[in-house]
Image (cartoon, rainbow, N blue to C red):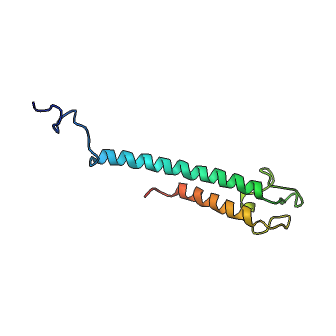
Amino acid sequence: MSAGGPGCAGEGAITSAADPRVNLERWRVAAALATCAALAVFVVAMAVAIGLYPGGSWTRPSARGFSLVRNFWCDLLRSQAIDGADNAAAKLWASVGFGALGRVQLPPG
């Protein structure tokens, strides 16, 4: 074989998994996928929490359900909804959602 041909470590050689550039690229892809997964968990968990919220807002305490206009997201984390009903299920899902959102904001590693 001639120098620089296939199988040599010269130009045109395939980079190996030990090449730091390949490992960095894999790490970036993994970090991007983890971020997308955490954001998806946040969106799904918050949608479930909003659907389970019994009701009440600060301007309409007897209203049914969660209003994106009248409620605060932190209302989903209350043990008791503003209307006085038990809010344990929505609180659990909102906690999962906010936990996933917090993980998205952490630096990778």
Residue 99 versus residue 14: which sits nearer the camera? 14
- Position of 86 compared to 108: left or right? right
- Position of 23 compared to 58: left or right? left
Task: Say which quarter of the image contains residue 6.
Answer: top left
Task: Say which quarter of the image contains residue 52.
Answer: bottom right
Above or below, 67 relative to 13? below
| Identity of the residue drawn at 37% across and 45% down | 25
| Identity of the residue drawn at 70% across and 52% down | 47
| Identity of the residue drawn at 80% across and 68% down | 86
- Position of 55 compared to 109: left or right? right
Above or below, 90 relative to 26? below
| Identity of the residue drawn at 73% across and 63% down | 89
Q: Position of residue 45 (x, y in %)?
A: 66, 55
Residue 49 versus residue 60: which sits nearer the camera? 49
Q: Where is residue 64 in the image (x, y as percent from the top left)?
A: 86, 56
Task: Say which quarter of the image contains residue 62.
Answer: bottom right
The residue lying furthest to the right in this view is 62
- Position of 81 compared to 97: left or right? right
Residue 90 versus residue 105: which sits nearer the camera? 90
What quarter of the picture does the N terminus occupy?
A: top left
Q: Where is residue 92 in the image (x, y as percent from the top left)?
A: 68, 64
Q: Position of residue 71 (x, y in %)?
A: 78, 56
Please give the count of numbered marks on the rendered protein.
0
